[in-house]
Amino acid sequence: MAALVHFKKFDKTLGIIGIPYSQSATLLLNCLISHEFAHYVYGERKIATKIAPQLKNALIKAFAAAHGITPSQGTLISNMMADWAQELFCDLFAVRLVGPCFSYAFIEIFDVVNDLDNSGGLFAKAAAEDAKFSVTHPAKLFRLKRQVSLLEDLGWWAEISGLSDNHYLRLLSLAKAFPDGDFKVHVQGKPFFDAEMLDALKGAIPLIEKSVSDAAGSICKGVHEYHDMRGPLEDYFKLGIVPSSIPADGEDHFVCPTPLTILNVAYKFYLENLQELINGIRDQDSLSVKHREYWARRVEMWAMKGIDDYLLLHKVRGA
């Protein structure tokens, strides 16, 4: 059929990301797309090829004292390390690209918040499951631990942990402090060279982080604008105002927050301040699941409109 209408071939650099239909209108959860975009970056920049020698060296060093490894196990070990490195690269690239909103979305999509007990501490049984590495992916708590480490390096952690208080941040703080000795590697439900695999991965972490830094280049981190605009944007959301432009203090002009800032403030507002919005609206109950779901979607819509306005304004200005 395509040949009959003289189709044009897609550009070879075109990346296509598939998402569930049910997720198509969910702005905040779609911060996860930055991870999928990172897989494309990983492939296009041939990062796997570039870091393969260092990954091999890390494995050789970690397994120096190991004995009785079969050829099939050796192949599996190498493949697992390569997969883990790619997944960690994609997580960290996503954090570098969009900030903490990726970590929030990660917690939400995987229900990692279930690792918290009623007192706000770790629920040991659930945390133990999320501390297990699989053949293809690092443990969820390990991934969060590395994300927090990068958030610290970028300056985001000081911004979100100082003035904020929500269950996602409590979980991130607990992941940050999670003991390395409690992570486990399982293959087909059985322990698999836990100590050696984790030692090799730890040895590869600086390499992965440098690869992320090199790939991201000079892309704006967004921390300073978030610091300056978080308060005004939260006030806008509380009043149901689309955050397209903010009056600049003492100046007769407006500042347009970037999509990065809008995303992170919107996610924080959703986690911490939704109740304030609902309590200010007549005949709405902040304890009602139906009402909370409705107003959460409204916050996402206001954020999306703010992002659309930013892109429109800057497209016109740059024309």
Image (cartoon, rainbow, N blue to C red):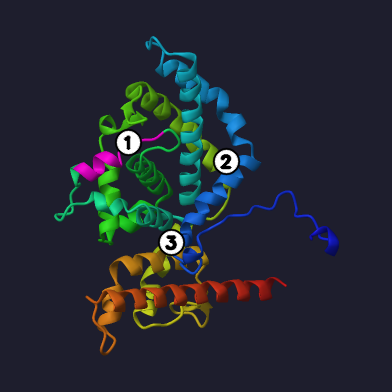
Q: Are marks 2 and 3 in contact (CB under 8 Å)?
A: no
Front position in the image: 183 or 23: 23
- Say which residue label 3 marks: 29
Mark 1 near mark 2, Cβ–Cβ under 8 Å?
A: no
**What kind of element bears circle 2?**
helix
Q: Amino acid at mark 2?
A: Asp
Q: CA distance from mark 2 to mark 3?
A: 27 Å
Label located before the other in sequence (1 or 3)? 3
Quarter of the figure with residue 133: top left
Q: Position of residue 128 (x, y in %)?
A: 25, 39
Q: Please tell me which of labels 2 and 3 falls first in the chain.
A: 3
| Mark toward the viewer: 2 or 3 | 3
Residue at the disc numbered 2 = 214
Secondary structure of the residue carrying tag 1 is strand
| Residue segment shown in magenta | 125-134
Looking at the image, residue 14 sits to the left or right of residue 55; the answer is right
Q: CA distance from mark 1 to mark 2?
A: 29 Å
Query: Which residue does the image show at 36% across and 78% down from the upper left?
Result: 294
Q: Report the residue at 52% width, 81% height from top.
A: 253
Q: Which of the 4 image quarters holds residue 318?
A: bottom right
Q: Position of residue 307 (x, y in %)?
A: 53, 71
- Membership of 181 in magenta stretch: no
Q: Residue placed at 26% from the left, 61% from the top? A: 166
Q: Nearer the viewer, residue 249 or 185?
A: 185
Question: Residue 77, percent across and down?
Answer: 46, 24
Name the image quarter holding the N terminus.
Answer: bottom right
